[in-house]
Image: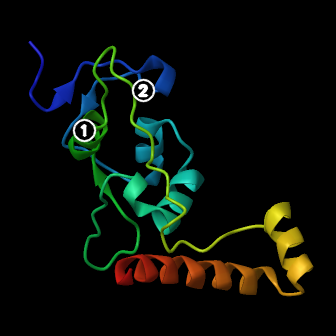
Amino acid sequence: MESPTSSTNQAGSAGISEPIDLNKVVNYKGLAALLLRTPDTLRVALATRPDTLPPPIYTPGTKSPLWITGDVIDWLRSYQVESGEKRSRKPRVCADEKAPRRGAPPMRERVDAQRLGISVKELRRRKKDSANRQPQAAAAA
């Protein structure tokens, strides 16, 4: 009979050969072994995308985060997909949202702006203004 504080899942490919103690407190190295990542990858993720990791615990007087193995396993299970079910992907940002554009403008916008003798930024502002005026004109008619 197995103890309630351990899991008999043997993750041989993960480098974990003994039963997992669910009450054990782990640092970056232990979390890396559980998540099949490197400690450096986890440090970067915690600094830049903390929502992609289980919530850490910070003990008074220390800077390094810690995790309880049982909490990490529960966090992993919350993302478990049932057999036959597709994994949900990150929702895409709509073009209508206020997210700033990145990269070079499309060729179509550059050519249109060049024909008008204005910048792409000005072209986009004019398009936005004219789009805002059209619903008002339709409501007035």
Quarter of the image with the C terminus is bottom left
The residue that label 2 is drawn on is 16
Considering only vertical position in the picture, is 91 above or below 141? above
Query: Residue 102: x, y in percent?
Result: 69, 68
Whether residue 109 sits left or right of residue 18 in the image: it is right
Considering only vertical position in the picture, is 100 above or below 72? below
Query: Residue 61: x, y in percent?
Result: 30, 80
Which of marks 1 and 2 precedes in the sequence? 2
Q: CA distance from mark 2 to mark 1?
A: 21 Å
| Amino acid type, mark 1 | Ser
Write the residue at 40% across / 30% down. Answer: 87
Considering only vertical position in the picture, is 50 above or below 27? below
Whether residue 75 sits left or right of residue 63 in the image: it is left
Name the foreground residue: 122 vs 141.
141
- What label sits on residue 141 in the rendered view? none
Q: Residues within 10 Å of mark 2 (few under 14, many from 20)?
A: some
The residue that label 1 is drawn on is 78
| Amino acid type, mark 2 | Ile
SS under mark 1 = helix
Write the residue at 35% across / 79% down. Answer: 139
Whether residue 65 sits left or right of residue 41 in the image: it is left
Q: Are marks 2 and 1 in contact (CB under 8 Å)?
A: no
Considering only vertical position in the picture, is 67 above or below 133? above
Name the foreground residue: 118 vs 93.
118
